[in-house]
Amino acid sequence: MQRNRALILALLILSVPACSQEPAAGPTDQPPALLRQAAHCLVTDSPDMRKLFHESRKELDLGYYLDTKSYPGEQALYVVDYSGPKLEKGLAYVFFVRQKDKRRILRVENNASFIKKKKGIEFLEKPVGGVWTQEHLEEAIDRIGQDSMYLFSIKEMRAPSADVSCESYADAR
């Protein structure tokens, strides 16, 4: 009986390191098509989109969260572009996703710059839409910070894309 317990314990101990050695998702993983399309929209030459992209960089460090519950009948894509190496600051965007024929339409509806602090998220530029929108952005930023991040070359993302159409809330003016 003692011998069986020792054998079972030894097998359990040996199996734990094998389970924990799975590689974590990271910048080398293939990014989801939806995030790649959003990255394309962030760097397009549209004057309205250019206003949203404040810095001159060679890469975007993006994470995302697709919310299908908060806006009934709509899909809200939250995208965070981190500018700090510790994922402590960045720009957050809210895109609404639609499909028209074979093309996906991404319409950016909101953006805000933020810094993550011990007490939560501080917005440097408040999002439009008040407290409800701000709370949803905070939740999305927290979620995204726990998931995989993907690097995108800005030069590559500027290439024309046949599978996505980019719009901005300012386009309707």
Image (cartoon, rainbow, N blue to C red):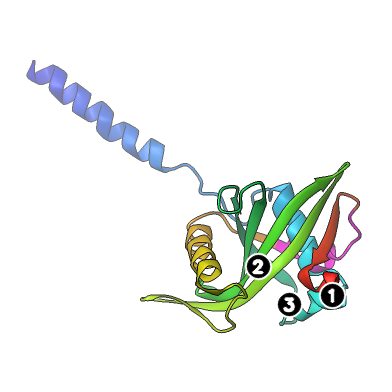
Q: Which residue appears at 71% of the width and 67% of the height?
A: 109
When the figure is inspected, residue 50 is found, relative to residue 31, above or below; the finding is: below
Amino acid residing under circle 2: Tyr
CA separation in Å, label 1 and label 3: 16 Å
Q: Give the residue furthest to the left.
A: 2
Decide whether residue 134 is among the magenta residues. no
Front position in the image: 123 or 55: 123
Q: Is residue 39 visible?
A: yes
Residue 84 in view: no
The residue wearing badge 2 is: 93
**Residue 120 appears at what percent x and percent y?**
41, 73
For mark 3, what is the residue?
A: 52
- Residue nearest the observer in this picture, 113 or 32: 113
Relative side of 80 to 159, left or right:
left
Residue placed under numbered mark 1 in the picture: 173
Which secondary structure, mark 3? helix
| 3 or 2: tag closer to the N-terminus | 3
Residue 92 found in image quarter: bottom right
Q: Quadrant of the C terminus?
A: bottom right
- Amino acid type, residue under disc 3 in the picture: Leu
Please name the residue shown 82% across and 64% down the image.
167
Q: Earlier in the sequence, mark 1 or mark 2?
A: 2
